[in-house]
Image: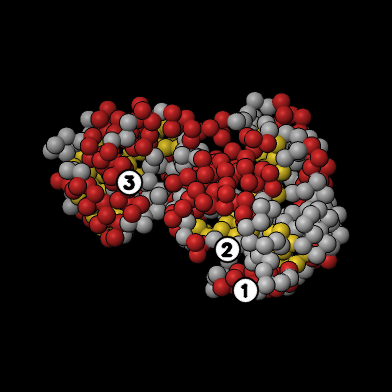
Amino acid sequence: MSPATPEVLVHPDADVLAAATAARLLTRLVDLQSHRAPLHVVLTGGTVGIAALRAVAASPARDAVDWSGVHLWWGDERFLPDGDADRNETQAREALLDALGEALPAGNVHPVPALSDDVPDGETAARRYAAELRAHAGADGLAPRFDVLLLGMGPDGHVASLFPGRSSLFEASALVVAEHDSPKPPSERVSLTFPLVRAAREVWVVAAGAEKAPAVARALAGDDVARTPAAAAQGTERTLWLLDVAAAAELPGAAAAERSDGGSHAASSGAADGLRPRSVSSAEAVWAAVDAYAAPLVAEPQEAVAVRTAAADAGLPDIAVSASQGRLLDVLARAVGARRVLEIGTLGGYSTWWLARAVPDDGTVVSLELSEAHAAVARASLADAGLGQRVDVLVGPALESLDRLAAADVEPFDLVFVDADKQQLAAYLDRAVALARPGTLVLVDNVVRGGAVVDPEHPDDRVQGVRAFFARAAAEGRVDGTVLQTVGEKGYDGFALLIVR
């Protein structure tokens, strides 16, 4: 695969950079877990890397990730005894891993072997780490294909422990190498190699400080890897450079980015010879905090908490709407006086609970779910909440269920909420309109995709599914609508709101 063109996001300072990196990582993991498992993530050390892990630990969105489905690796390690304070693993455990507790199974953590009698040298550690990588490889590779690979960068342009001028930069077969003469202490290190780094789906390079600005500029200009190793740090689907203002100071357009009011108007050409960084305001790092602050207004009832907890206990992915979004469903359903509600995508029944409480005692929520196991969890939770009589969960492919409802000539629905596979959104819209009446409100979740929806060449089929939905909605003469962009603990996304004529 060809490497992805780098994207550059510039943050006001190192503290905001760390917080925003944490928020971005949590959002990405939750998003990925909606369609892929397990996930494999490579952590980095360094001041900003460890600060980002602390921010993950402190985030109210931390528990949105199903950590039992995440495997953690390291891009490099200082070859020191287990527990040494300078080991990246030790620092990561203190910053995040210990705080996750039993949520992160011990077997999902894959540290580089430490110096010991059994592992006397870096070569032995490198061989054993390569064996660990192979043990978790997919059917089509020698190692896991990393979903997100985080890298720090030194002032000399090194990433992991791949330093300028070293033969390890050009290693073509080994997955892991030993470094015996690191220019920064300690001298003994173990590092992933570039073939493995460049096979990652997404590579994020995180750098802060004016001393790194020359190397950042060289790397993004496509410098010789022997001089600036970071130039080779590219993912197959995305390459993301997360910088503070000081580290971005020598990039083309850096002055404009620094002057921008938050980045929404700062352009990014994406080309190395004309790269303009996009500045990110500190707002991105505090979205989840605002959600937490507004919690008393949302006032998530204990019954809703019980539904959410039951889904988590059953091992369902934590991809349901947030409490504030659930409250929005409740408010909208009551505002339109909904008596009959159609939901596409039940999961554990969390959004179903909000909708069911909004309809009157003689109201009905028909919810469609592909998985019988998920439906069973939802039915049990809704029954425990005293709402089971208002909800009918239908199991099977949603399009088939929708066609059966249409064939049965059921009474029209007053509100339709779509929170299912994005690839089918256009087809879901067709069925929703067929099952509606004039005035029916149709809500479709996750249609902004962090802004990715504007990219006609985006490789994610969910993004392409949303784009097809937009095209269908625009051409559909029976609906009027708009898109409400949202930010919060679930990241940057949005709803489409349509009303049937």
Asked if the residue under mark 2 is in contact with the one under mark 1, i.e. CB atoms within 8 Å, the reply is no
Amino acid at circle 3:
Arg
Residue bearing mark 3: 308
- Residue 333's disc is none
> Which residue is drawn at the image coordinates 32% and 51% (left, top)?
311
* The one of 191 and 493 positioned closer to us in this rendering: 191
Q: Label 1's element? A: helix
> Which residue is drawn at the image coordinates 36% and 55% (left, top)?
316
Q: Is residue 343 visible?
A: no
Q: Position of residue 14 (x, y in %)?
A: 68, 36
Residue bearing mark 1: 131
> Which residue is drawn at the image coordinates 49% and 61% (left, top)?
106
Amino acid at circle 1:
Ala
Q: Position of residue 446 (x, y in %)?
A: 44, 43
Q: Quadrant of the C terminus?
A: top left
> Among all residues in the image, which is located at the extreme front?
117
Q: Position of residue 161 (x, y in %)?
A: 75, 58
Residue bearing mark 2: 110
Asked if the residue under mark 1 is in contact with the one under mark 3, i.e. CB atoms within 8 Å, the reply is no
> Which residue is drawn at the image coordinates 44% and 46% (left, top)?
63
Work out whether mark 3 precedes mark 1 in sequence or the reverse, and give the earlier one: 1
Mark-to-mark CA distance, 2 and 3: 30 Å
Q: Position of residue 163 (x, y in %)?
A: 81, 57
- In the rendered view, does 362 fall on the left or right side of 312? left
- In the rendered view, does 464 fall on the left or right side of 268? left
Amino acid at circle 2:
His
* The one of 136 and 346 positioned closer to us in this rendering: 136
Mark-to-mark CA distance, 3 and 1: 39 Å
